[in-house]
Image (cartoon, rainbow, N blue to C red):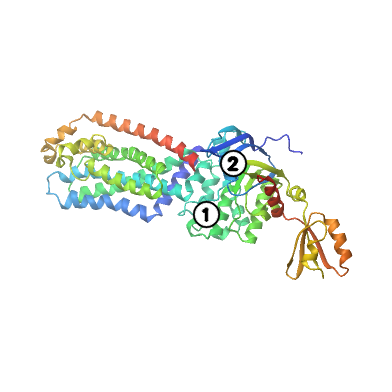
Amino acid sequence: MPQTHLRPAIEARGLRRCYGDVAALTGVDLSIEPHSITALLGPNGAGKTTFVNLVLGRGRPDAGTLRTLGATPGSAAARRGTGVMLQTAALVAQLTVREHLELNAGYYPAPVDIDLLLARLGLTGLAGRRYGALSGGQQRRAQLALALVGNPALLVLDEPTVALDGESRRAAWALIRERADSGAAVLLTTHLLDEAEALADRIVVLARGRLIADATPAEIRARVGVTAIRCETSLTPLELAALPGVIDAGREEGASVLRSRDTEGTLRCLLQRDLSVRRLQVTPASLEEALNTVLRQQEPA
Amino acid sequence: MNIAIYLNESRAELTRAWRTPAFIVPTLTLPLAFYSLFGILLTAPRSGQAAYTLATYGVFAALGPALFGFGAGIAADRDAGILALKQVSPVPVGAFLCARLTTAATFTMAVLLALYALAAWGGGVTLPAERWLALMGVHLVGVAPFCLVGLCVGLRASGSVALALANILFVALAVLGGLWLPLFLFPAWLQHFALGLPTYHLGALALATVGGNFACSAAAGAVAACGETLPAGMHWVFLAAFTLALAAVARHSWAHGRELH
């Protein structure tokens, strides 16, 4: 890694946090480096929100150490370098988009150009409109702009593109990617796996307060080793399910679809049994399938 | 740069309040309407009551923006998720509070100017210029302790509870502090409550500023029991102690609120 000499933007060691008797985080070690986008995934209640809150100084760890930008989380020094988008947050309804951005830009030492940012997020025409008069998607875009306007070294984005349409989402992804490319550390939580797949360099999976996977999206998919095979065949689903390595088989839009954990073995046999196979497609498991498998492996027997 | 943050934050908060009719209309009109009724229309001319009530209704005017802007306003902001984003943003806590304080003080000053104009032209109150200024000073001092009362409510209670509490405190502090009706009209046991209320002490200071020795005031035998004869210094000491104690509570509540949400 060329960036190993850089200080991590977030550094957690043995991080624990309990709410009463319930342990939300049980000894998490995690470093988030500059120049990278890390997606924090996991089922509800896995500890994602708790982790993000601790990073932002909203609550203190019960044990372990946590540094945000080398400072105490929530301290003035940490906050001055952090841009935040919270899922449940709102902005003052009576101020316009531009007023909000100007106010927030003033908090940071080196903010970005507001007009440029507005244009990139398709908010130029809405700059003079009050936040309260925006649609849900427009409000989310304004909140993302607010997180980005300070040009911070650390971006913490909680479900950044929920409620955005396809075009806005791609614009948001491009902007976030650019921030990481120019050196920012990005930590995002998301339920949208296509978002994690398109955006993240690294996927960190939390389950029941523990870190259970930490790898690139491709590595996580490969770890599961399941592929989806799609084709038009005269074999029935029952016959297909009996092929070697096949986990299950079914029909989808006129084609047969099977999942296999032994791609080559399944294909060899399929092509022997049915010489008329057409439109054959082999795709690696989706990230969603891979994650579900990773999570299942973690469940207590 | 830090000063710019304070200024920008205050300007944004003032803009916001100005664009919220539900905040400005009652804040501006209530003290003026009450004063017109109890200070002018329902009083005998030249009885001195217009001046007496000016002193206490000026304190009342400072109460509204503080309790509703701070108390109910901050609680509503927290419920909406506005406060969470502020608390994780780089804005210093001081700038956030200063903006709210500036807003409450600005609106209070606007009501006070309208109130003084009403008293001078409608109520026939005449005071030397330096007395008007001193009165403005005393009335504006009230903004600080009242804002802290509001802040403690706003940080501790949820939105709807905070609004109800702000309303109760608004009326209780005004009535029991002798702002609506002179304290000497109350039974003696009720008058003792006033000693613990910042509204009473500010009212007493304001009364001393406008002159104080009115017929209605002198007639009050019972008032001596609850300290209308306290020296001015005691009122200031009480207000300072009250303000410091509330500041400590508010400080604690702020840290508490950051962790919870």
Structural crowding at the residue carrying mark 2, measured as other residues with C-alpha within 10 Å and reported as few (<14), some (14–19) or many (≥20)? many
In the displayed structure image, the side of residue A140 where residue B54 appears, left or right? left
SS for tag 2? helix
- How far separated are the C-alphas under marks 2 and 1? 30 Å
| Rendered-image quadrant of the C terminus of chain A | top right
User: Do circles 2 and 1 both sit on a common chain?
Assistant: yes
Q: Earlier in the sequence, mark 2 or mark 1?
A: 2
Observer-nearest of B19 and B154: B154
Proximity of marks 2 and 1: CB atoms separated by less than 8 Å: no
* Residue A227 occupies quadrant: bottom right
Observer-nearest of B200 and A67: A67
Q: Amino acid at mark 1?
A: Val
Measured as percent of width and height from the top left, residue B20 is found at 39, 54
| Rendered-image quadrant of the N terminus of chain A | top right
Name the residue carrying label 1. A97
Q: Amino acid at mark 2?
A: Phe
Q: Which label belongs to residue B235? A: none
Disc 2 vs disc 1: which is toward the camera?
2
Looking at the image, residue A189 lies above or below residue A258:
above
Name the residue carrying label 2. A51
Looking at the image, residue A126 lies above or below residue A30:
below
Chain letter of disc 2 in the image: A
Measured as percent of width and height from the top left, residue A278 is found at 84, 69
